[in-house]
Image (tube, coloured by chain):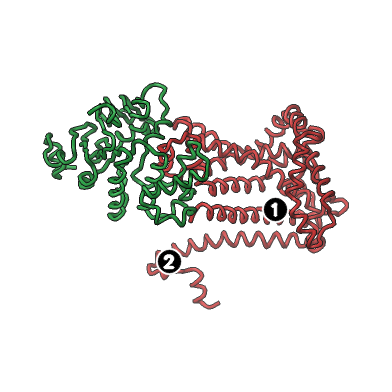
Chain colours: A green, B red
Amino acid sequence: MTDSEISLRTEGLSAWFGDHHVVKSISLSVSRNDVYALIGPSGCGKSTFIRCLNRLHEEIDGARVQGDVWISGDSGSENIYAPGSDPVAIRRQVGMVFQKPNPFPGLSIFDNVVAGLRLAGVKRRSVLEEVVETSLKHAALWTEVKDKLKKPGTSLSGGQQQRLCIARALAVRPKILLMDEPTSALDPISTARIEELVMRLRSEVTVLIVTHNMQQAARISNQTAFFLMGELVESGPTSRIFTKPKDTRTEQYITGRFG
Amino acid sequence: MSRRVWSRLFFRNRVENSGDQVFVLSLKIVAWATVSLFAGMLVYLVYLARGAIEALGFNFLTTNDWNPPMEIFGAAPFLVGTLASSFIAIFIAAPVSIGTALFLKEVAPKRVARVVGFLVELLAAIPSVVYGLWGVLVLAPVMRDHVQPFLASWFGPGTYFAQALGHVLTGLFYPFLLIADVLGLTEVTLGTLSEKMMALAQGLFDGPPLGLGLLSAGVVLSIMITPTVTAMSREVLAIVPDSVREGALGLGATRWEMIRIALLRSSRAGLVGAVILGLGRAIGETMAVTMVIGNRNEIPKSLFEPAQTMASVIANEYNEADGLHLSSLAAVGLSLFLVSLLVNLAARGFIRWIERGTRA
């Protein structure tokens, strides 16, 4: 694998909550246009790991990160934890979708989608309108909301809200999209729609998705990493992880013997 | 009333257990006692004020003269004094309190927030009379020697600020003038309106800096209501889930941008409610205001002038009043009661109106 194909690479990434060491020196590389699934039992550090990739972890009181995360952009790759690196600029390149749908209350569907663009200083109405349409189409929500863009984002159903949040993340054209258990609060139909969506997004963006649903990982990802107690136990192509795991702990987990 | 109706009044659901019956009945009695106390006070105030209401009618509220020896009683100066001092207080306290709440909730480290939050809440524990003393002994001299001369030189008569404010006020009231004109209610023309508004704007920071007066009362009130508004605003901000904050940060918002798009937009209604609650407190506050407002029974033309509020005139004159004077003071009390009620109702309406804008 050459450097240009790598979208994101971590080197010895560790994270703490106070004295609690929750992510232990993880090194992982993600290729461009991968859908990379992170699986593991609750509390294994997979969510914390993903929150380190856009420097959101450090926003929590007492949280700390060590190690490097390289993200390849237009001008070569950049370490987001280098001294002087600006977390705000990084979060504009690395989008995130959260476990619970979190549209901004008080903002319309339209304003929710363009919130990121407005933060970046885009003001032209024609540009915003175009982005709203393409982003909502990408997020497979356009046909359902195109006639009520002025309605509050919070008036939508849970599954629609989550797709709205995906549209909001896509609107700023991120290179990488982090998804932290995006379907765990949704019903099966909404879940299926979002899974389809993720598979289609592959061509445009690199996706890292945390899930505790192993069938989901198997369905939508091409690479999988298994986390346990803050450590990376095993990673590789999804088909191999699920059929011929090298580590016995991986095998025990995917066959349902714990977790 | 038949027994059935009586039992309907007290029991919505049939309660089988006799212990429960006693408990529910005592709760109902306590709740109804509060309501009847409210009604009783209102009735008694009207009863006390009946002399003034019969003698003066609605003119009582619009007459700009209060002269007990001459048996002239008009409450307009107090109405203006109460509203003006309360709005000055809100004008200062609203940004300070909401800013403090944002600092405590969103910016300050937890330990700092706990200490500072405690100190702010402690302000509410200081007795009103102590605020009054502080106002007289500390604030008034500072206002007289430093703040008022400064304000006069920047916003006083002849300044650009006064000029501009005069024009703005004229523009603001012009639509009302037009409506009144169409209805044939007024003889005022645009020229005289503009003259009046100019005089109002020019006079706002005019006159000798006395220290004690409307402005100082407003400042003392603003400090007194800050803990209430801050505490309420903190509660309102605490309702916004962390996931919404993270959503904004994850989108590349700076801390200030996060506050703007994720917090202020969604908690507008609640923050307005917090401010109105403070306004309600300011309208009724008596002791501290009586001590610093200067107690002069005239509509002040300048913020520096002494004035009188509805609460302070009652406190000042109740002891020596009898006859129509006493009845007029009761009418002032009734007006204060109604103004507070009106402000609260208006606030509720306003909050509902904002909420309709933010939710479906």
Which residue sits at x=65%, y=59%? B41
Which residue sits at x=48%, y=61%? B27
Which residue sits at x=43%, y=31%? A88
- Horizontal side of A197 relative to B146 (left or right) equals left
Whole-percent x, y for residue A141 in the image: 38, 52
Q: Image quarter for residue A30?
A: top left
The lab-note entry on whether marks 1 and 2 share a chain reads yes
Whole-percent x, y for residue B72 in the image: 85, 54
Element marked by disc 1? helix
Whether residue B117 is visible to the viewer of this picture, yes or no, is no
Between B347 and B122, the residue placed more toward the observer is: B347
Residue at image mark 1: B336
Q: Chain of mark 2?
A: B
Residue sitting farthest toward the bottom: B2
Residue at image mark 2: B21
Q: Give the CA distance from mark 1 to mark 2.
A: 40 Å
Amino acid at pointer 2 = Gln
Location of the N terminus of chain B (image quadrant): bottom right
Amino acid at pointer 1 = Leu
Whether residue B101 is visible to the viewer of this picture, yes or no, is yes
Between A196 and A126, the residue placed more toward the observer is: A126
- Horizontal side of A128 relative to A102 (left or right) equals right
Residue sitting farthest toward the right: B70
Whole-percent x, y for residue A212 in the image: 24, 44
Total marks placed: 2
Whole-percent x, y for residue A201 in the image: 31, 44
- Horizontal side of B13 relative to B282 (left or right) equals left
Between B206 and B176, the residue placed more toward the observer is: B176
